Image: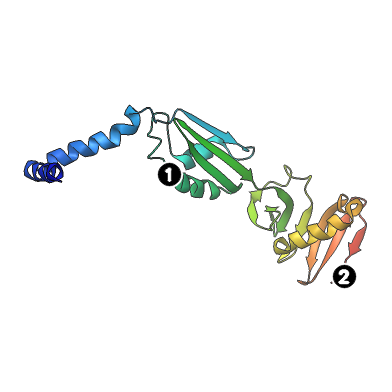
Amino acid sequence: AGGTGFAGYFVWRQGGGVIASIGTMISGWPQFAGMTVQDISVEGRRLVSKEAVMAALDVHRGDSLLKFDPRAARAKLESIEWVESAIVERRLPDAIYVKLKERAAVALWQRDNDFVLIDRQGRLVRTVDPNYYGYLPLIAGAGAPEQITALSLLLQEVPEIGRRVRAAVWVGQRRWNITLDNLVQVMLPE
């Protein structure tokens, strides 16, 4: 107790210089102990660019591993349009591990003259050139993206028809008209 009191009195008498030196020593400890970022491994990245991942992580080789905030990095990664979820971990002594789950585009939604990729949950991913995603079924109609999950579940019950769907139109906010690959149109009931 006496030593702590003396140390406190000494720091108080010396002013901010001692406190600044102690702060510098403490902040430099991870580099001294070898806990700096030397490796960043990313798993599950296909559509997201490497540059977008590195910008979201905002960390470079040689930075302190203990100053890296995995929660903030995860939030930034999940704000990228193709990222559905992310896991970000510090792995002592010198690595950062990232596992991405990317969104899977299941359809193209035609909205006026634009084509927007839609994921499994009906979320809009981004406007695209339809020539690059022509293999995906085309959907149309107001509110169609919100109903894509229900349509997908319905088509999974009859996979031989589900594989042949080329387009689907959400009609009157209540039912689907689907067009098959042989141009047969099926008007589903409500």
Q: Determine the residue positioned at 78% across, 65% down.
A: 170
Q: Please indicate whether residue 22 sits to the left or right of residue 127 in the image.
A: left
Q: Please indicate whether residue 16 sits to the left or right of residue 105 in the image.
A: left
Query: How many marks do you count on the picture?
Result: 2
Three-letter residue code for mark 1: Asp
Q: Residues within 10 Å of mark 1 (few under 14, many from 20)?
A: some
Q: Which label number is shown at residue 179?
A: none
Query: Could you say whether the residue bearing mark 1 is in a helix, strand or loop?
Result: loop
Q: Indicate whether 174 appears above or below 53.
A: below
Which residue appears farthest toward the left when viewing the image?
13
Q: Tell me the residue that label 1 is attached to.
A: 69
Percent position of residue 143, x then y? 71, 66
The image quadrant of residue 35 is top left
For marks 2 and 1, give the one nearer the viewer.
1
Percent position of residue 39, x then y? 49, 29
Decide which of 182, 44 is in the foreground and name it. 44
Q: Determine the residue positioned at 69% across, 46% down.
A: 129
Q: Please indicate whether residue 66 sits to the left or right of residue 159 in the image.
A: left
In the rendered structure, which disc, 2 or 1, sits on the residue that comes first in sequence? 1
Decide which of 21, 61 is in the foreground and name it. 21
Q: Determine the residue positioned at 12% across, 46% down.
A: 5
Q: Residues within 10 Å of mark 2 (few under 14, many from 20)?
A: few
Percent position of residue 23, x then y? 23, 39
Three-letter residue code for mark 2: Pro
Q: Tell me the residue that label 2 is attached to.
A: 189
Q: Determine the residue positioned at 15% across, 44% down.
A: 4
